[in-house]
Amino acid sequence: MALGNSRRGGQREGMNAWPGYVDALATLLIIIIFVLLGPVLR
């Protein structure tokens, strides 16, 4: 869906870097939550 819109604009390189940052931050957040809540749930 967003590929057609991103190809028209000139900010394709800027927008292309965001999924990597979002994926890394989401992974770190999930790991931190599991590490903090692991002992609590046991």
Image (cartoon, rainbow, N blue to C red):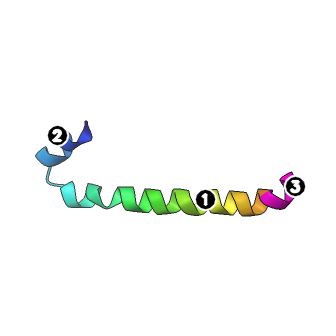
The residue beneath circle 3 is 42
At label 1, which amino acid type do we have? Leu
Tell me, yes or no, whether the highlighted magenta stretch contains residue 39.
yes
Q: Quadrant of residue 31?
A: bottom right
The residue beneath circle 1 is 29
Task: Report how far apart the C-alphas of labels 1 and 3 lie in the structure.
Answer: 20 Å
In magenta, the rendered stretch is 38-42
Quadrant in which the C terminus is drawn: bottom right
Q: Mark 3 or mark 2, which has the lower sequence index?
A: 2
| In the foreground, 36 or 7 | 36
Position of 4 with respect to 35 (left or right) is left
| In the foreground, 9 or 28 | 28
Q: Quadrant of residue 10?
A: bottom left
Residue 27: image location, x then y, percent: 54, 60
Image position of 24 with respect to 3: above or below: below
Q: Mark 1 or mark 2, which has the lower sequence index?
A: 2
The residue beneath circle 2 is 4
Residue 40: image location, x then y, percent: 86, 56
At label 3, which amino acid type do we have? Arg
- Tell me the element at label 1: helix
**Mark 2 crowd level (few <14, some 14–19, many ≥20, 10 Å Cα):** few
**Mark 3 crowd level (few <14, some 14–19, many ≥20, 10 Å Cα):** few
At label 2, which amino acid type do we have? Gly
Task: Report how far apart the C-alphas of labels 3 and 2 lie in the structure.
Answer: 47 Å
Point 71% across, 58% down: residue = 34
Q: Main secondary structure of the magenta part?
A: helix
Outermost residue toward the front?
42
**Mark 1 crowd level (few <14, some 14–19, many ≥20, 10 Å Cα):** few
- Tell me the element at label 3: loop
Point 27% across, 57% down: residue = 16
Position of 28 with respect to 17 (left or right) is right
